[in-house]
Amino acid sequence: MTTTNYEFTRGIDYSAIVATSERVAWTVNEIFHDRRFDTTKRIVPDSWVRTRHLAFLNEREQRTLNHLRAFSYVHLFGNYEEFIPIHLTGFARQDWHADRAHLRALLRFGEEEMKHQQLFLRAEAILEESCGHAFGRYFDKDRLTAFTAATLAYAPLPRSLILLALEWGSQRHYVDSVRDHSGDSSDPLYVDILKYHWIEENQHTKTGVLEIAQLAVDLSSDEISEAFDQVQGIAGLVDKTLIGQVHQELATFQTVTGRTLAEAEVTALSEALYQSMRAIWAEVALTHPNFKRVALELSKEGATKLGIA
Ligand SMILES: [Fe+2]
Ligand SMILES: [Fe+2]
């Protein structure tokens, strides 16, 4: 393996990543036991929903929207993670007789993401059970296959970059859920899901930056800058799923509350839901200080394309 001089890889090594990964590992059953969500309260922070300014919604409806967003988050995250094990396989094949710790870090990373998918699927099921109704899902098998294939069609560097942003985003999601004290705090079970997810994602960000540095070493500065255009391409794929899931939220909202909204109200609500969806996925991830640091060190020109300066 070629050594790289990127500052963002300093102090990070595969052996330490594997050791931490073994020490902090958890099982889905350990998190859930027989716990349920308390649906008499909000589940996620208000900042994840941002519909408080809509005066035509009563408290119960605001709470329903909060539960809908709690569902959308686990639904989307679980499906976004589908491409990761296959994405990592590429690195594992390439470096299969490099050092053992490197291979173990990649394989554990992939296995953990498959476990996370189970975590999120279980959360979807328990949310439906706790709330006593079904939630609309953007992803079915066909959409998931298409989204995963479209993401994997991009080169490894842009895939690694968007993944890194998403993983650091998951840190912010957890921090928001414990720090946002406007009104009630977030649901304890939900906070645990975010917390245990981040505990493992933390190792993934470390493996991620090492892979990114390795990929960048073989590329020209123009090619690295070009990778940021491709990051925007993948972000465009994600954006379509956000719009699709907001449609699902609106449909479920009307079914669950029995409320028929006027056309202007539908427009205002879908706009607010779309904006908050974009905020918790795109903004939170792409403006994370650690991600900015990596982007800027790789390519100032590339980073500018994502609004990072
Ligand atoms: Fe994950
Ligand atoms: Fe991850």
Image: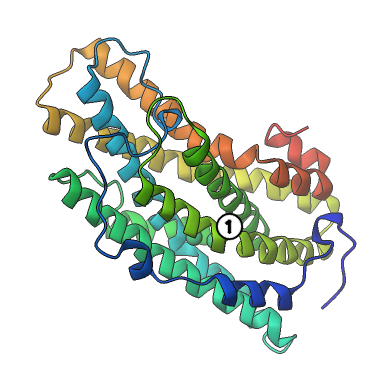
Q: SS class of the residue under badge 1?
A: loop
- Ligand 2 within 8 Å of disc 1? The answer is no
Residue tagged 1 = 154
- Between 221 and 160, the residue placed more toward the observer is 160
**Residue most extreme to the right:** 5
Instruction: Identify the image quadrant of residue 155.
Output: bottom right
Q: Which residue is pictured at 37% across the width and 27% down the height?
A: 273
Residue 253 drawn at (x, y percent) = 20, 31
Relative to 39, say whether 24 is above or below: below
Q: Amino acid at mark 1?
A: Tyr
The residue that appears at 25% across and 18% down in the rendered structure is 266
Q: Residue furthest bottom?
A: 97
The crowd level at tag 1 (other Cα within 10 Å; few <14, some 14-19, many 20+) is: some
Q: Is residue 127 visible?
A: yes
- Answer with left or right where residue 105 lies relative to residue 271: right
Q: Quadrant of the C terminus?
A: top right
Q: How many marks?
A: 1
Q: Residue furthest left?
A: 258
Q: Kindly tell me whether residue 149 is visible in this rendering.
A: no
Q: Is residue 200 left or right of residue 42?
A: right
* Percent coordinates x, y for residue 210 in the rendering: 74, 65
**Residue in view at x 36 percent, y 18 percent:** 52
User: Where does residue 248 sit, x and y in percent of width and height?
Assistant: 25, 38
**166 above or below 305?**
below
Quadrant position of the N terminus in the picture: bottom right
Is residue 245 placed above or below 223 in the rendered structure? above
Q: Is residue 255 above or below residue 1?
A: above
Q: Is residue 44 left or right of residue 208?
A: left
Name which quarter of the figure residue 19 lies in.
bottom right
Q: In the depicted view, which residue is nearer to us: 60 or 251?
A: 60
The residue that appears at 72% across and 46% down in the rendered structure is 290
Where is residue 127? Give x, y as percent.
Answer: 24, 49
